[in-house]
Image (cartoon, rainbow, N blue to C red):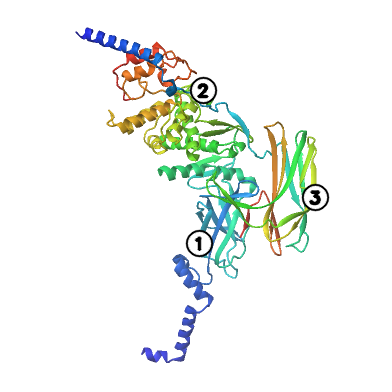
């Protein structure tokens, strides 16, 4: 029966045509096959059109002539029609600013050529959003690329120079995305979206649980952006921001909760960039640079103690950094990185730096400490903190070993009569912080002789 | 008995402390303990960064149509207009032609590579001026440029006025010129542009 049919001329012609459609360059068959392979969904549609894959790199202006890739931005693809634009879909750029979208059907309705592609790059991702004063997300729209051909469609897209402040804030290089990426890459924390309204109001600040507000000039100060992002992170971890006073300064006492809140935020950009300097922008052209590696007890212009935000930031930095203090003090010999600081931040909401230390002490050491390694780590952490004029030692424990014994008395005694500024001066021995090592210090050590501390 | 023990311990400690003080003073291991403060930079250092301030000093670039036929060897006039809100002396105005560079890497370790040739050159006019500006009186000048090869270049006009040795005003404007074999595209700083 089948053989007979093949012999019929009409049947043979139909079979030949079908064969040609499938294996020749006849457009409908070729595109149907491609669609079927690359994207099964498009095979459902009309077989008259092929597919298009939109790819490219997105860039923002570092200055007028230097471009940097836009990382982790949402790129939306549209088709322009006489009735308006049709949203086709979206994807994110990668680290290099590269995105790809498709393949999708390149069918632009009956009688027309390929899609009329518009690409819009948005300062928006799961990490960050940068919005205008009126609340719209910053975006850059390309021209319309009319009647795009089938196949790959590639372009580089450069966002307007006039918008560059928004992209700096959004960016991986200087902005919110950098903070988000740092946490993701170092401790695996995927921070929720931070929203920044720019340019807005006159001073940089964070609304707990809400937006970061940056004035126009603040977009140029990466540390300022990341400082506010640090507040955002603290809020997301704690569910609140410890009570803070509005007017506070790096070097002077505020209170313990403000110092902790601001100290953490000052520290955050230092950790992200692994640098000791916190640059505080004042306006578009001027900033103040604080080297938080440098301050020590009684630094000129600085108050001492854990109610000073710069001291708290310096203490966190000295725990974090790999730079030991210079000879001959050696108070900071800890190079601990970010992991354990984050561990406490992540697990134990603290309102003060002392609470942070207590949580650290409770988390990382057996009580009593069981080996030399733990004791050494405890000692180094306390002395790194001590470097920043924050003294959490037990009374009389001059050498920070958790026991007040003859060694402590000796340590103070051999410096008896030494005043600050003299060659043998050592802050550790000045237990009452009165700038002279005298009988009072020896007395404190003697009085507490025999005590042990687990701080 | 307990009181006696405590008294004894106190006496021993007292004697020990006295001995230690004596040892510390008489036999000082000064060379070991010699210390000096490292020099902290605790006084905030005000520094400047080159950031545009378009509110006090502003620069505006405009460009005429390129001569026909568009493409290579076309010419156009680029006009720079500078205006300030207050009197300024010795304002430096500079026009720079440059390729466009793209950067890769994490700040501050970014490397820059040019996209390609800048495609344009100055054929007439000065690219640098030192002028005195009166408040709200504009200064303008023109240069003539020519397309020399297929490429993508930037024309940047910069005005800088140093009010003091550490405080300055700076303003910039730019135009982007994409030179094709038989066409030229011009973009200003408000536009998104694309290139293959």
Q: Position of residue A408 (x, y in %)?
A: 35, 19
- Same chain for marks 3 and 1? no
| Element on which disc 1 rests | strand
Q: Position of residue A402 (x, y in %)?
A: 32, 24
Chain under numbered label 3: B
| Element on which disc 2 rests | loop
Q: Position of residue B97 (x, y in %)?
A: 71, 51
Left/right of residue A359 with respect to residue B80 in the rendered view: left
Please state which of the two labelled residues, at mark 1 or mark 2, is closer to the viewer.
Answer: 2
* Distance (Cα) linking label 3 and label 2: 56 Å
Front-lying residue, A213 or B85: B85
Front-lying residue, B37 or B31: B31
Chain under numbered label 2: A
Q: Position of residue B175 (x, y in %)?
A: 70, 51
Farthest left residue in view: B1
User: Quadrant of the image for the C terminus of chain A?
Assistant: top left
- Same chain for marks 3 and 2? no
Left/right of residue A26 with respect to residue A355 in the rendered view: right
Q: Residues within 10 Å of mark 1 (few under 14, many from 20)?
A: many
Q: Which residue is mark 3?
A: B125
Instruction: Name which of mark 1 and mark 2 comes first in the sequence.
Output: 1
Q: Residue at x 47, y 43 (%)?
A: A180
* Distance (Cα) linking label 3 and label 1: 49 Å
- Is the Cβ of the residue at disc 3 closer than 8 Å to that at disc 1? no
Q: Is residue B101 above or below residue A338?
A: below
Query: Which image quarter: residue A119?
Result: bottom right
Q: Which residue is mark 2?
A: A299
Q: Which residue is mark 1?
A: A102
Q: Is residue B139 visible?
A: yes
Q: Is residue B124 above or below residue A257?
A: below
**How many marks on residues?**
3
């Amino acid at each position: 029966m089948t053989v007979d049919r093949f012999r019929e001329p009409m049947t043979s012609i139909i079979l030949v045509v079908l064969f040609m459609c499938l294996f020749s360059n006849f457009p409908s068959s070729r595109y149907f096959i491609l669609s079927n392979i690359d994207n099964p969904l498009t095979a459902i549609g009309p077989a008259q059109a092929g597919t298009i894959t939109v790819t490219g790199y997105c860039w923002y202006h570092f200055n007028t002539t230097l471009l940097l890739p836009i990382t982790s931005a949402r790129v939306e693809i549209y088709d322009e029609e006489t009735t308006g634009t049709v949203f086709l879909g979206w994807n994110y750029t990668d680290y290099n600013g590269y995105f790809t979208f498709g393949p999708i059907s390149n069918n632009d309705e009956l009688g027309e050529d390929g899609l009329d592609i518009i690409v819009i790059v948005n300062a928006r991702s799961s990490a960050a959003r940068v919005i205008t004063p009126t609340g719209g997300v910053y975006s850059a729209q390309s021209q319309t690329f009319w009647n795009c051909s089938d196949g790959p469609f590639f372009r580089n897209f450069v966002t307007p120079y006039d918008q560059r402040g928004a992209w700096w804030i959004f960016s991986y290089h200087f902005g919110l995305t950098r903070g988000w990426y740092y946490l993701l890459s170092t401790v695996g924390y995927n921070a929720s979206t931070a929203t920044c309204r720019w340019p807005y109001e006159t001073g940089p600040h964070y609304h707990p649980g809400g937006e970061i507000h940056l004035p126009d000039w603040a977009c140029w100060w990466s540390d300022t952006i990341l400082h506010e992002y640090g507040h955002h992170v603290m809020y997301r971890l704690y569910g609140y921001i410890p009570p803070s006073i509005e007017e506070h300064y790096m070097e002077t006492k505020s209170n313990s909760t403000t110092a902790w809140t601001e100290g953490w935020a000052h520290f955050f950009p230092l950790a992200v960039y692994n640098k000791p300097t916190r640059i505080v922008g004042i306006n578009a052209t001027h900033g103040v640079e604080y080297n938080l590696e440098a301050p020590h007890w009684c630094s000129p212009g600085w108050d001492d103690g854990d109610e000073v935000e710069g001291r708290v930031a310096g203490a966190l930095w000295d725990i974090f950094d790999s730079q030991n203090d210079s000879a001959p003090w050696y108070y900071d010999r800890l190079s601990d990185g970010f992991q354990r600081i984050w561990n406490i931040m992540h697990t134990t909401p603290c309102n003060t730096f002392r609470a942070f230390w207590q949580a650290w002490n409770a988390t990382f050491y057996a009580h009593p400490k069981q080996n030399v390694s733990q004791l050494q780590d405890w000692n180094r952490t306390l002395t790194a903190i001590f470097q920043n004029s924050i003294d959490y030692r037990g009374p009389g424990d001059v050498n920070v070993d958790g026991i007040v014994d003859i060694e402590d008395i000796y340590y103070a005694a051999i410096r008896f009569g030494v005043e600050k500024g003299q060659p043998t001066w050592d802050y550790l021995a000045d237990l009452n912080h009165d700038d002279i090592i005298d009988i009072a210090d020896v007395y404190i050590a003697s009085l507490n002789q025999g005590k042990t501390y687990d701080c | 008995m307990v009181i006696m023990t405590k008294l004894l311990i106190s006496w021993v400690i007292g004697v020990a402390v006295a001995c230690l003080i004596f040892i510390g003073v008489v036999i000082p291991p000064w060379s070991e303990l010699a210390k000096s403060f490292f020099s902290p930079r605790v006084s905030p250092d005000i520094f400047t960064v080159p950031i545009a301030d378009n509110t006090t000093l502003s620069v505006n670039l405009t460009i005429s149509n390129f001569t026909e036929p568009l493409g290579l060897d076309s010419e156009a006039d680029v006009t720079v207009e500078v205006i300030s809100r207050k009197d300024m002396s010795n304002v430096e105005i500079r026009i720079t032609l440059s390729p466009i560079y793209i950067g890769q890497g994490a700040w501050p370790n970014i490397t820059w590579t040019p996209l390609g040739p800048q495609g344009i050159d100055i054929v007439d006019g000065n690219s640098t001026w030192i002028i005195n500006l009166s408040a709200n009186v504009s200064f303008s000048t023109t240069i003539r440029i020519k397309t020399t090869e297929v490429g993508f270049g930037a024309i940047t006009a910069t005005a800088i006025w140093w009010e003091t040795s550490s405080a300055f005003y700076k303003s910039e404007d730019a135009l982007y010129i994409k030179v094709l074999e038989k066409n030229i595209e011009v973009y200003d700083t408000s536009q998104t542009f694309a290139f293959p």
